[in-house]
Amino acid sequence: MTDVTVVVVAKECLPGKVKTRLTPALTPEGAARVASAALADTIETVRALPASRRVLLYDGVVLPEGTDDFEVLHQVGGGLDERLGAMFDAMTGPTLLVGMDTPQATPEHLVPVFEDPERDAWFGPADDGGFWSLYLRQPDGALLRGVPMSQDDTGAVQLARLTDAGLSVGTLPALLDVDTVADAEQVAALAPTSRFATAFAAERDTTLTTTTGGAR
């Protein structure tokens, strides 16, 4: 057990509200089920970490399964930088943020944080130019506010913000966020036994069967 709080940032998996770039290859309902599976994989990974506290930074009403013992912090309004900044300001000790779009993430990917929690920061880059994880030993929302989110230079700007502040930053393995169908196919291949991979395969099969009019 370490004195680290792990926060999962997530939104309620409602059709038309999550993983919209997986449509029309998947139906909005199917995309929501795939997103829910990705979140379930993430929650399982977080539950396996030796954290002292687990928090769900949530945009939604109905809580996902497996989070009964998580503290819930509802997301504030504003852009993602404002929402993440508010979360880090609400924390009082070492805090590790994990997103819900990398269902292939395992506890092993996050081992460095727990082996060296005295480092100022750990940064988990995403292959699309963003980041999937961020650890701050001394949480400070000002380190995130103003960082342009959902761009191909988001990760570079965020990392520069940390280093420019004089922080010692360690780097976690780079992972692929699931945004598109091509991303989903790659991640499912990387984590074939995950809930995400199972759900994605089922939805693709359903969509293909509906499109072709069923088996012949």
Image (cartoon, rainbow, N blue to C red):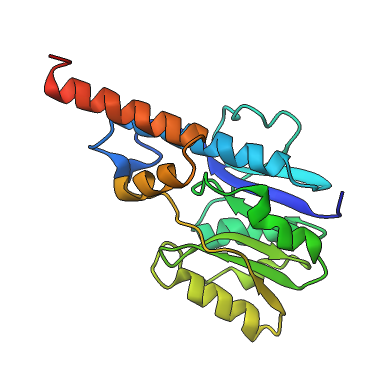
Give me the residue at 76% from left, 32% from top: 69
Image x and y of residue 156, in percent: 49, 76
- Image height of 101 relative to 175, above or below: above
Q: Is residue 108 left or right of residue 101?
A: right
Of residue 115 and residue 169, the one placed in the foreground of this image is 115
Q: Quadrant of residue 203?
A: top left
Residue 33 visible in the picture: no
Split into 4 quadrants, where in the image is the C terminus?
A: top left
Residue 91 drawn at (x, y percent): 76, 56
Q: Residue at x 74, y 55 (%)?
A: 90
Residue 161 versus residue 199 in the image, above or below: below
Residue 41 or residue 141, whichever sits in front: 41
Residue 61 shows up from this direction: yes
* Image position of 216 (left or right of 31): left
Residue 213 pos. (x, y %): 13, 17
Q: Which quadrant holds residue 204?
A: top left
Residue drawn 74% across the image and 46% down it: 49
Determine which quarter of the picture holds residue 124.
Answer: bottom right
Image position of 212 (left or right of 13):
left
Count up the numbered dots.
Answer: 0
The residue located at (24%, 37%) in the rendering is: 25
Q: Position of residue 72 (x, y in %)?
A: 69, 39
